[in-house]
Amino acid sequence: MPSLDRNKLSLLLHAEEQLFHKDHPVSYGLYQRARKSLHGGVPMLWMIRWAGSFPVFVKAARGAHFTDVDGNDYIDFCLGDTGAMTGHSPDATVKAIREQIEKGITLMLPYEDVIWVGEELQRRFKLPFWQFALTATDANRFVLRMARMITGRPKILVFNYCYHGTVDETFITLDEEGAPISRPNNMGPQIDPVHTTKVIEFNDVAALETALSAGDVAAVLAEPVMTNIGIIHPEAGFHEKLREITRRTGTLLIIDETHTICAGPGGYTAAHGLQPDFLTLGKPLAGGVPAAIYGFTEEVSKAFNEKLALDDADVGGIGGTLAGNALSIAAMKATLQNVLTDEFYAQAAKLQEYFTAGVEGVIREFNLPWIVKRLGNRSEYWFRPTPPKNGGEAHAAIDVELDRYMHLYALNRGILMTPFHNMALISPATTQADVDHHTKVFREAVQSLFG
Ligand SMILES: Cc1ncc(COP(=O)(O)O)c(C=O)c1O
């Protein structure tokens, strides 16, 4: 098996950085200007985490491609980290947005369309009651409040290296001895999450049993397949155990489908018959217009109603003035009806299999100790020979320099991968030619390192 020459990697990375500078002079100029008014030169902190030393400024995006201000064209496999999994500005969503804009954008009153959306969510996810938010973060915050209110229990439980948005209680990890600590660089927490949250490794049934047996956990908040530290599949029987133990201990189960909606039209939940008490989802629901949802069971709805003081519903910690606004509902209806369809999922999963086969072919050709993991229309490559079983193992496999090189090599050749790991999503507009280009560039990158 070939080993990675770190000196060579450093030199190659330096050369890619120079190439990036040469090919992006207009972006560079804009970045310098942006730094004078925007903290870090970007509107949102994450945008400085790309592989180039400054962000690419976008001129226009449509379907699976975008162009930058320097005239470079890119295939977008990042797709707004799932926010644009529908492809950029899908026709049906754009049409609905245009029509709705003429009829009002936000009112704090419902239009009839919202009932269609509620019924469609019932059909897809098999949960009877729904509420709307603007971001998946908010959806998660709100259901955590509901869960604590209903159960009267103070704590929540999450899996090591999860990500559920900027939800304060979730920024907790396990240290090398397996003790819970506030996640490194947790910015100004109101309270140390070790007081609010239990954290265990994914797939660890024994730890789950112990953590929930104390009866002080209101809810487990989980992605059904971990995605934010890379794709980590549940082991056989894990979800059955998770459901059985949560039920037995009176703990509510929240399944966050924000990324795993890549697994099918009803997410991983519908595809695998999970039975959560709550389900949350945001990002691609409205084709990129801010929109999120949270659904729950009849029992949760009843228990919540019994404790809810309607007169104070607007100041109880669940809200968002713009939540359920007419524009996002119209966009959500059009997107669910026309874009995130059964046909899309079937076709995208097939193309993703083709993507994965291309990458695996290169890995085999060069005999690399790397693997590719896939979930529906999402995949990513890992610089380790076996799939990690949990977040701790996955985190230990991160190779920052190699990761940066693979991203930048791709970016310099017209391919955008998701910045926090080597993840690729297939949209309705992604073509076989787009995938072939990725396979070719991936092979060239590997050749430059190991050839
Ligand atoms: C699983 C999961 N849940 C929730 C969120 C939060 O989404 P948002 O940042 O749109 O609120 C994310 C964001 O990456 C996520 O990956």
Image (tube, rainbow, N blue to C red):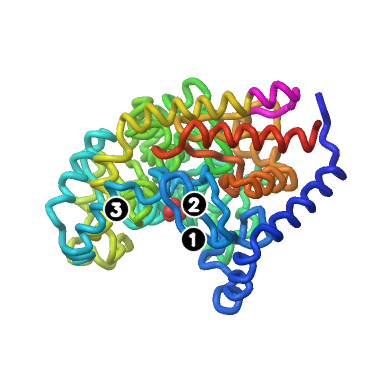
Residue 11 % position (x, y): 83, 49
What secondary structure is marked by label 1?
Answer: strand
Using residue 388 as the reference point, say whether residue 239 is left or right of it.
left
Picture quadrant of residue 270: top left
- At a point 87% along the width and 45% down the height, the residue shown is 7
Question: Residue 14 placed where, x, y %?
Answer: 79, 53
Q: Within 10 angstroms of label 1, few (less than 14), some, or many (20 or more) residues?
A: few
Residue 6 at x, y percent in the picture: 84, 42
Magenta range: 361-371
Kindly identify the residue that appears in the image at 47 percent across and 53 percent down: 165
Dot 2 lies on which element? strand
- Residue 148 seen in the current view: no
Vertical placement of 414 versus 2: above or below?
below
Residue 66: give its label. 2
Pick out the residue farthest to the bottom: 36
Going from N to C along the chain, the mark reached first, 2 or 3, is: 2
Snapshot quadrant of residue 276: top left
Look at the numbered disc 3 and give the secondary structure of its residue.
Answer: helix
Question: Mark on residue 94?
Answer: 3
Whether pointer 1 and pointer 2 mark residues with C-beta atoms closer than 8 Å, the reply is: yes
254 vs 124, nearest the viewer: 124
Q: Is residue 240 visible?
A: yes
Does the closest atom of ligand 1 sit within 8 Å of the Cβ of label 1? no
Q: Disc 1 or 2, which lies upstream in sequence?
A: 1
